[in-house]
Image (spheres, helix red, strand yellow):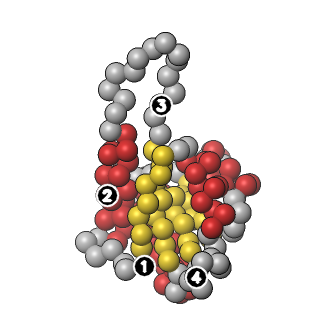
């Protein structure tokens, strides 16, 4: 458990995908049962550019990432975000940011974007990196099947 307080912390990686909406729902289900604090964490970063080139129109990535975070939370919970849910926007690559955040978490929940068929058996690069390197247990949530 989180040493700063006796309340467990569950971190959920959020990227706006249906898998991350489902990860938020599953994470909140666990948080309810464990009386845990849930952190919906979204990452953003500037795209890599070549030295000497000035990239035009590469601002406001943080603003759009914040909007995606809020939209994803709204899709998961509707207009009433549960009181134990906190949103957090961090600059950095998702793989590194989530693994670093897992140091202070009791569980990390990430979505996996499905590909269907044989490819659907594979994990994505971020989810597989989290499974391999996180400092806490990791739950990988599949995208719900379309009906």
Residue 84 image label: 1
The span from disc 3 to disc 1 (Cα, nearest Å) is 33 Å
Above/below status of 55 relative to 64: above
Choose the circle earlier in sequence order: 3 or 1.
3
Residue at x-position 63% and y-position 67%: 104
Marks 4/3 in contact by CB < 8 Å: the verdict is: no
Number of the front mark, 4 or 3: 4
What secondary structure is marked by label 2?
A: helix
Which residue lies under the disc numbered 4?
5
Q: Is residue 143 found left or right of 73 in the rendered image? A: right
Figure quadrant of the N terminus: bottom right
Marks 2/1 in contact by CB < 8 Å: the verdict is: no
What secondary structure is marked by label 3?
A: loop
Pinpoint residue 110: horizontal percent, then vertical percent: 56, 60
Marks 3/1 in contact by CB < 8 Å: the verdict is: no
Of 21 and 146, which appears nearest the observer? 21
User: In the rendered image, is residue 7 in sight?
Assistant: yes
Number of the front mark, 1 or 4: 4
Structural crowding at the residue carrying mark 2, measured as other residues with C-alpha within 10 Å and reported as few (<14), some (14–19) or many (≥20) = some
Structural crowding at the residue carrying mark 4, measured as other residues with C-alpha within 10 Å and reported as few (<14), some (14–19) or many (≥20) = few
Number of the front mark, 3 or 2: 3
Residue 47 image label: 3
Choose the circle earlier in sequence order: 4 or 2.
4
The span from disc 2 to disc 1 (Cα, nearest Å) is 18 Å
Figure quadrant of the C terminus: bottom left
């Amino acid at each position: 458990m989180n040493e700063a307080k006796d309340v467990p912390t569950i971190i959920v990686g959020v990227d706006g995908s249906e898998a991350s909406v489902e990860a938020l729902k599953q994470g909140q289900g666990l948080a309810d049962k464990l009386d845990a604090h849930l952190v919906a964490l979204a990452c953003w970063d500037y795209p890599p550019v070549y030295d000497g080139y000035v990239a035009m129109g590469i601002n406001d990535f943080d603003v759009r990432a914040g909007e995606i975070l809020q939209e994803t939370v709204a899709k998961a919970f509707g207009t009433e975000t549960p009181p134990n849910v906190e949103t957090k926007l961090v600059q950095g690559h998702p793989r590194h940011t989530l693994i670093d955040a897992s140091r202070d978490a009791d569980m990390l929940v990430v979505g996996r974007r499905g590909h269907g068929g044989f490819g659907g058996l594979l994990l994505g690069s971020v989810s597989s990196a989290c499974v391999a390197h996180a400092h806490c247990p990791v739950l990988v949530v599949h995208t719900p099947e379309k009906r």
